[in-house]
Amino acid sequence: MKKVLNFMKSTKLKNAILLIFLLCLYIFISAHGYVLAVSEDLSQAVFRLHVIANSDSQEDQELKLKVRDKLLEYMNTICADCSTKEEAIALAEDHKEDFQKIAEKTIKENGFDYPVKININNFYFPTKNYGDISLPAGFYDALRVEIGNASGQNWWCVMFPSLCFVDVSSGIVDDEAKENLEDNLDKESYRIISEKEDTGFTFKFKIIEFFAEKGFFTAKN
């Protein structure tokens, strides 16, 4: 009788462990699927600019910002009528040599002779706040500008829909930029990156960050 009771207890324990394991697996799979859907939506909606300074010296950091300003000025000119990310990327690809020349000219005008490397590809970005808009870590299409040794601090913004505010230091995203971003995202994705006061969406944002930082999904092909 004692052996039977021990066996039953052992069986119940094993079943309980199995159920807990299956529940955890289900939660993980569900969360992973959710993260992939939101991350894919965000990745398909935005085109980012990534400028990397030669070094962290004050001169190189100031130069980085001057290059940034000139590139944004040009991008805003050629992409003024873009309605999709694909259009913005296609225009950036077509004018890649122009971006190169503008960056090189800006560097030379400021007394430096650093080489410039420009790539348009899919890159990993850490979590970044743009005023009251926050983009979670993940893989995004971007125009990356590497100045000289490219060993200095980075600067990021969203070229499409434009979140590169005129007054970068203020950290304010205007209503038009938010509307453009909202138009290019589904409702759930937009609320996750903008509803900072909603604890539910804040928690979902943290889940996306966790999966991205742990490498549970990879770059787009």
Image (cartoon, rainbow, N blue to C red):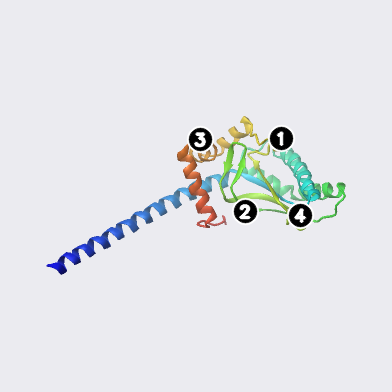
Name the residue rendered at 60%, 34% in the picture: 178
Q: CA distance from mark 1 to mark 2?
A: 27 Å
Q: CA distance from mark 4 to mark 2?
A: 23 Å
Nearest to viewer (mark 1 / mark 2):
1
Which disc, if any, is residue 122?
2
Pick whichever of labels 1 and 4 is earlier in the sequence: 4
Residue placed under numbered mark 4 in the picture: 55
Indicate the position of residue 97 as horizontal and vertical percent values. Answer: 77, 50
Q: CA distance from mark 4 to mark 3?
A: 37 Å
Residue type, label 2: Asn
| For the residues bearing labels 4 and 3, Cβ distance under 8 angstroms | no
Is 193 on the left-hand or right-hand side of 123? left
**What crowding class fits label 4: few (fewer than 14 Cα within 10 Å), some (14-19), or many (20 or more)?**
some
Q: Callout 2: helix, strand or loop?
A: strand
Quarter of the figure with residue 15: bottom left
Q: Callout 3: helix, strand or loop?
A: loop
Which disc, if any, is residue 167?
1
Residue type, label 4: Ser
Is 35 on the left-hand or right-hand side of 17? right
Indicate the position of residue 141 as horizontal and vertical percent values. Answer: 62, 50
**What crowding class fits label 3: few (fewer than 14 Cα within 10 Å), some (14-19), or many (20 or more)?**
few
Pick whichever of labels 4 and 2 is earlier in the sequence: 4
- In this view, the residue farthest toward the top is 175
Pick whichever of labels 1 and 2 is earlier in the sequence: 2
Residue placed under numbered mark 3 in the picture: 197
Is 163 on the left-hand or right-hand side of 56? left
